[in-house]
Image (spheres, grey):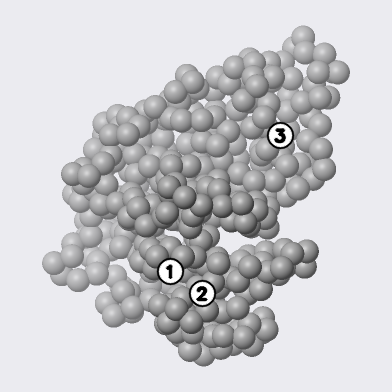
Amino acid sequence: MRVAIVGTGAIARGSHLPALTALAAGQPLEVVAAVDVDPAAVEAFCRDAGIAHPYTDLDRMLAEQRPDLVTLATPPRFHRDQTVAALRAGAWVWCEKPPCPSLEDFDAMEAAENSGGDGPYAAIVFQHRFGSGARHVRELLAGQAMGRPLVAHCQTTWYRDEAYYAVPWRGSWSSEGGGPTMGHGIHQMDLLLDLLGPWAEIRAMAGRLVHDVETEDVSTALVRFENGVVATVVNSVLSPDEVSRIRIDCERATVELTHLYGHRNADWRITPAPGVTSEVADVWRDFGPDVPSSHVAQLEGLLEDLRAGRRPRSSGADGRKSLELVAALYKAAFTGGTVRAGEIGPGDPYYGALHGDAPGWAPDVRNGPRRSRPDGGAGPVSGADPAQLFGISFRDSR
């Protein structure tokens, strides 16, 4: 298994490379190349990791190394072109979240797959839906062991200061795709969808309460699922007491996950309703051997799917569903209306850009890169060089 890493920043060093290294210990797998537009960065990355071939040109790497798998650890605005290039070269792709800045981009990525055969396919990094805890709860809910799910809460309330937004590509629709709804909350929203199934309709609000950026810094939503569940969703980068949380109230029990950036069995809690016997509750609480949510947990399954030539989880429609919910949340927030599943398609302004060209939210492209003011007005990015904003190194990754 020949693997190449594209982008050599924090997420590559902290997650992609360690996951590949851990799995290489038990199977024939080699990271043969890395790519970054910064020559010094990619050479240092390869030297530190013992990777033989550093590149600054993705197409050249694909032609010369012919990798079986390409992992993308680059900012979201690069994902479409890089994914399409890798797929057309015959490589499978494992792409960091957010998947890309729009549904239009995602559909272009999916169209480049060989979906009628044994691949290649492109999977999105949604590691929170993997691991023993998520698997156990998904099985309980699917079998309605705790009764019908009724009410849910999905919370990603984190804290990001001005230094975080000093990185030029953050807070910009064109480069990041969205604010905390897209860049942070998408993980818990993806897990919620994986546990509860398809959503039906959404209403939402969004605001800029602190940060001078184009995108939102807080959003809230009400979501109704096809199975009748009613859920609240909160995404924020304004919350000093940081937490990621999912809570689902069923007829016979409440199941809750409380963590920050990843979860283990101990982070899940099941509270039975009155009348449920301890013997039944003990079965629900038996999560089995602890497999944490992680890049390793997802990548292990992806490699099995690659070898078997079958579509992996979090690819195709399964990978698109979270981005569709994000797009619908923005549309509901910026229009004040109810958005229904499946309504955002070609011709809809929210299909090509998550801001939907909404007044007060869409950037003013006529006067160069701009960020919208917290009061809904627009103004230039303080101290930002336009060339900096759009000429981003792959190493400026999450």
Amino acid at dot 2: Arg
User: Which residue is rendered at x = 81% and y = 31% of the image?
Assistant: 286
Where in the figure is residue 342, as x and y percent of width and height?
32, 34
How far from the left and from the top, in percent, is residue 45? 60, 82
The spot of residue 209 in percent (x, y) is 38, 51
Whether label 1 touches label 2, CB < 8 Å: yes
- The residue sitting at 29% across, 70% down in the picture is 381
As drawn, the residue found furthest toward the top would be 275
Q: Residue furthest front?
A: 117
Whether residue 213 is visible: no
- Distance, label 1 to label 2, CA atoms, is 7 Å
Element carrying mark 1: loop
Query: Which residue is label 3 attached to?
Result: 136
Is the C-beta separation of discs 3 and 1 under 8 Å?
no
Q: Nearer the viewer, residue 11 or 345?
A: 345
Q: Going from the N terminus, do you reach mark 1 or mark 2 first?
A: 2
Assign a secondary structure to mark 3. helix
* Amino acid marked by disc 1: Ala
State whether residue 396 appears in this view.
yes
Residue 56 falls in which quadrant of the image? bottom left
**Callout 3: few (<14), some (14-19), or many (20+) C-alpha neighbours within 10 Å?**
some
Q: Which mark is residue 89?
A: 1
Q: CA distance from mark 3 to mark 1?
A: 37 Å
